Image: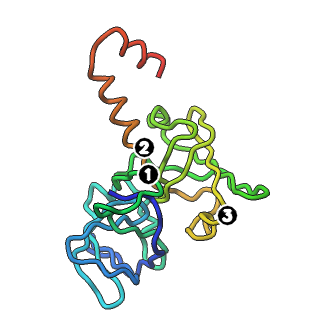
Amino acid sequence: MFNGLIREIGLITNFSNNTLKIKSNLKPQIGDSIAVNGVCLTVTKVLNDGFEVELSPETQKIIPIENYQPGKKVHLEEALRFGDKIDGHLIQGHVDAIGEILEIKKNKNSYDVIIKTDPRIIKYIAPKGSISIDGVSLTINEVWSDRFRLTIIPHTFENTLFKEYKVLRKVNIETDMFSRYIYHMLKNSHNDINDKILAWW
């Protein structure tokens, strides 16, 4: 589990034979979980200047693979430990869908970011709820049929890769896990009340 607070920006130095080599100051152990742009991956080798992780074929199918090529920067977060403070929200490191940035607009003291995504996951996205974008825990402000708006404070914007993102950038999206679980439970519990709730949802 992760909480969406980016501890470091890593640099991909090689990607071959399903193995991703990342330059980083983190000092993980073999077998540790690291979120790389929000994707939970297992450390398979520790290097003097970083570490390696392996991308399964399934993972490669569901992420924008162009963001994992040599020379690309990535958000890194080590897994939570019991007793750690949770300042973001609970994140599993499982990508629900790919999003595309449609707009980045600077306001007086924040940045509005509009992201388009698969309409099938919109039911899990709620105004004032939480969402993970490339591993960053963010708050949703508005939701439409196939897109949503985030408002990002300057500290988060400047200390993540969002400061480098451009329109049309593809991003990993993980919706709030509690929203997914509640929807699944209601969907598989057949009674009149639940049917009415799902029909509204």
Q: Nearer the viewer, residue 37 or 185?
A: 185
Q: Nearer the viewer, residue 138 or 114?
A: 138
Q: Nearer the viewer, residue 48 or 168?
A: 48
Residue at the spot 60% in from the left edge and 56% down from the top edge: 168
| Residue plotted at (49% across, 55% down) | 137
Could you tell me the amino acid type at mark 2? Asp
Left or right side of 34 for 88: right
Whole-number angstrom distance, CA of label 3 to CA of label 2: 23 Å
Amino acid on which disc 1 is placed: His
**Percent of width and height locating residue 44:** 22, 75
Query: Tag 3 or tag 1, which sits nearer the N-term?
Result: 1
Is 85 displayed left or right of 108 in the figure? left
The residue at the point 31 percent across, 91 percent down is 48
Q: Is residue 145 above or below residue 192?
A: below
Q: Is disc 1 placed on a helix, strand or loop?
A: loop
Residue in view at x 45 percent, y 65 percent? 66
| Image coordinates for residue 38, horizontal then vertical, percent | 41, 60
Q: Which residue is under mark 3?
A: 154
Name the secondary structure under disc 3: helix
Residue 164 occupies quadrant = bottom right
From the image, tell me which residue sits under label 1. Answer: 89
The answer to the question of whether label 1 and label 2 lie on touching residues, with beta carbons closer than 8 A, is yes
Estimate the spatial distance between the alpha carbons at disc 1 and disc 3, rounded to whole Å: 19 Å
User: Eyeballing the image, is 13 above or below 2?
Assistant: below
Q: Give the class, few, some or many, for how many residues have Cα within 10 Å of label 2's Cα (few <14, many ≥20).
A: many
Q: Does dot 2 land on a helix, a strand or a loop?
A: loop
Q: Amino acid at mark 3?
A: Pro
On the image, the x and y values in percent for residue 45 come to 23, 80
Residue 176 numbered tag: 2
